[in-house]
Amino acid sequence: MRKIVIPCLALLCLLAGCSTSNKTDSSNESRPSAKPAAKQAEYETGRVAFQKLYLSARLWAADVKPFRLQSQFTVDAPTREGKSGLWRASFASPAKRMMKLFVWSGLVGPDAPEAGLSFSAEDTWNPSNTSTQVFDIGFLKVESDTAYSVAQKHGGEKLTQKDPKQPVFFVLAWDTSKNQLLWHVIYGSSQDEAKLRIAVDATSGEFVRVEK
């Protein structure tokens, strides 16, 4: 009689274990999986973005020199802080006689450019072309937020008070006529639609002129 009871007890324990296991698995299956947190857009000032782009450009050519840095306006960008979620920098290699565009993006969304650093194909560079005149990075001492503050004091504030969502973007380039590096603070969504353009010395931070 004892021989029959022991196997029966073992069988009951085994069935009880299976039942507990099934309940546990069922409970896990019904529990909703945690959703990953939505990625937030990143915004940078001009000099910070430029450093990232410059380091990337140096991998292309050791002798690279910049000739243009430009931001792109997006609605949510903290423009008052001189920041943008997209910066493009153009570099030239005198040794190669070539130029290349590098892009930093912190934007997110289905229509946003690829996040991080990217670059275009090489193109021919002409050192005598005034629109692609390279400059020494040592001239870039003033941040884009400082340039914005200066521009606000010379006409920009009237526009932003009237329209808090006034588009603003920044262009950094060498002025061959004055031999100085300038921040161009442009109030508008494009060069053609600009309501105001303010030039600020990118080395001293001083107001230079209102541009037409």
Image: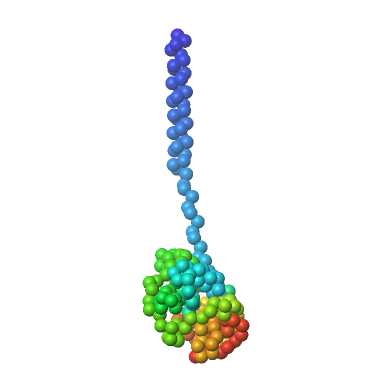
Say which quarter of the image contains residue 94: bottom left
Say which quarter of the image contains residue 112: bottom left
Residue at horizontal 44 percent and vertical 42 percent from the top: 29
What residue occupies the far front of the structure in this picture?
95
Expressed as whole percent of the image width and height from the top left, the position of residue 135 reads 51, 81
The residue nearer to you, when weighing 71 against 153, is 71
Residue 53 at least partly seen: no
The residue nearer to you, when weighing 141 against 146, is 141
| Count of numbered tags | 0
Expressed as whole percent of the image width and height from the top left, the position of residue 58 reads 48, 70
Residue 125 at least partly seen: yes
Expressed as whole percent of the image width and height from the top left, the position of residue 57 reads 47, 70
Position of the N terminus, as image quadrant, is top left
The residue nearer to you, when weighing 131 against 205, is 131
Q: Is residue 130 above or below residue 62?
A: below
Residue at horizontal 41 percent and vertical 65 percent from the top: 110
Expressed as whole percent of the image width and height from the top left, the position of residue 122 reads 38, 73
Colour convention of the picture: rainbow
Say which quarter of the image contains residue 26: top left
Q: Is residue 27 above or below residue 148?
A: above
Residue at horizontal 48 percent and vertical 81 percent from the top: 134
Q: Is residue 59 above or below residue 135?
A: above
Residue 202 left/right relative to 105: right
Residue at horizontal 41 percent and vertical 78 percent from the top: 97
